[in-house]
Image (cartoon, helix red, strand yellow):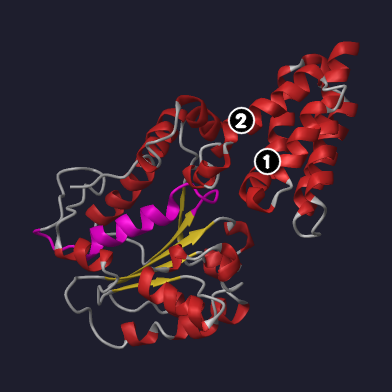
């Protein structure tokens, strides 16, 4: 049997609805990106697709049987009563890779911008007949935020007139941006960030070779989202955070730390580490400001805001990596100088 880390409240709500025979036909799984909503959707799908004999009902969660027929078919991406809708590959080569190995094997730049209306319309073949081997048919859309406008309208027709014994699990990172007509036809299930203990357990299981310093850095960086943390596994985040803290502590008045950091992160091979630092630098500055009462001033906030703006525009505007890192380091150093004057 398998269990799902965290989100026990969400499991309980879903199971309670199922046990009472009031299971809604469409659920919006709402919460920050990388928090585990897609994993929950796949677990909920198996729970519904397993037969009564294979489903463990004594527990209030899903408590799944990893050796069930449903589990094996889902793992092989061949369950006849299940559809997973995601953005496809940009090119024929990438689309073939997605079909053979799964969409999750593609990098962000290899994916199309949206889920198309054609992908939603292709679901009609699933709805045209009764379920094959299960009591339910399950559709997971990950993420519904990626639907193009035509696709959203096509989906709305299915939500307004739901096919019999069909459950839609719609992953959403920003449910407030969805069409009100879609939201009104769905049950919203909200997901909270994982606590530090759950984060440590999730990261230790996904990346068992992490040392304690790196694990602690990743827990902090994820802010309750294992998916976000795992993006930084190969970035040496503990070292980068240590250098950032040194700059904010000492001011780095001779520019040695920030110059070394800028040179290292400007190399082409260091792109993942560069992106990790861009993502973390504003958060580290915010933490420093919060912990230093003397820095909790308008000027400190201005430094943080400039760093946030710079980090967010650096990649879209293809700014020079070395110059960006040096400037971020200078803004961090300015916080240390304010500490000294306080």
Q: Residue 196: image x %, image y %? A: 46, 29
> Nearest the camera: 203 or 268?
268
Quarter of the image for the C terminus: give it: top right
Residue at screen point 32% across, 82% down: 126
Label 2 with label 1: CB-CB less than 8 Å: no
Does residue 287 appear in this view?
no
Horizontally, is 263 left or right of 27 in the view?
A: right
Does residue 76 appear in this view?
yes
Q: Residue 183: image x %, image y %? A: 53, 64
As helix, strand or loop, the secondary structure at mark 2 comes to helix
> Nearest the camera: 124 or 224?
224
Comparing marks 2 and 1, which lies closer to the viewer? 2
> Nearest the camera: 186 or 301?
301
Question: 40 above or below 234?
Answer: below
Using a 10 Å C-alpha cutoff, classify the residue at mark 2 as few (fewer than 14 neighbours), some (14 to 19) or many (20 or more).
few
Q: Residue 248: image x %, image y %? A: 77, 23
The answer to whether residue 10 is magenta is no
Horizontally, is 162 left or right of 193 in the view?
A: left
Question: 241 above or below 319?
Answer: above
Q: Give the range drawn in magenta.
A: 30-53
Residue 239, numbered label: 2
Task: Identify the image quadrant of residue 239.
Answer: top right
The answer to whether residue 38 is magenta is yes
The residue under label 1 is 277
Residue at screen point 87% across, 12% down: 340
């Amino acid at each position: 049997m398998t269990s799902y880390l965290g989100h026990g409240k969400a499991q309980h709500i879903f199971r309670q609805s199922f046990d009472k025979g009031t299971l809604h036909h469409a659920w919006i799984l709402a919460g920050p990106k990388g928090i585990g909503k897609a994993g929950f959707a796949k677990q909920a799908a198996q729970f519904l697709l397993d037969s009564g004999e294979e489903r463990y009902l004594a527990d209030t969660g899903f408590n799944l049987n990893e050796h069930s027929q449903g589990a094996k078919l889902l793992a092989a991406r061949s369950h006849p009563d299940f559809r997973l809708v995601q953005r496809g590959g940009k090119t024929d080569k990438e689309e073939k890779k997605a079909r053979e190995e799964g969409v999750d094997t593609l990098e962000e730049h290899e994916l199309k911008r949206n889920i198309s209306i054609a992908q939603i319309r292709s679901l009609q073949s699933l709805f045209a007949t009764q379920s094959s081997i299960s009591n339910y048919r399950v559709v997971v859309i990950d993420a519904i935020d990626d639907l193009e406008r035509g696709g959203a309208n096509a989906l709305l027709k299915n939500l307004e007139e739901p096919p019999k014994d069909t459950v839609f699990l719609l992953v959403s990172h920003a449910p407030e941006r969805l069409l009100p007509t879609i939201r009104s036809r769905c049950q919203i299930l909200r997901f909270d960030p994982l606590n530090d203990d759950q984060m440590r357990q999730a990261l230790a299981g996904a990346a068992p070779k992490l040392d304690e310093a790196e694990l602690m850095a990743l827990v902090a960086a994820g802010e309750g989202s294992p998916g976000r943390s795992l993006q930084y596994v190969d970035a040496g985040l503990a070292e980068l955070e240590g250098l950032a803290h040194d700059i904010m502590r000492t001011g780095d008045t001779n520019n040695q730390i920030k110059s070394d950091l800028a040179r290292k992160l400007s190399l082409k091979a260091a792109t993942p580490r560069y992106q990790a630092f861009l993502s973390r630098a504003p958060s580290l500055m915010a933490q420093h400001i919060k912990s230093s009462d003397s820095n909790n001033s308008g000027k400190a906030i201005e430094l943080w805001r400039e760093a946030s703006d710079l980090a967010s525009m650096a990649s879209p505007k293809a700014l020079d990596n070395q110059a960006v890192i040096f400037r971020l380091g200078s803004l961090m150093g300015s916080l240390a100088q304010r500490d000294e004057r306080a």
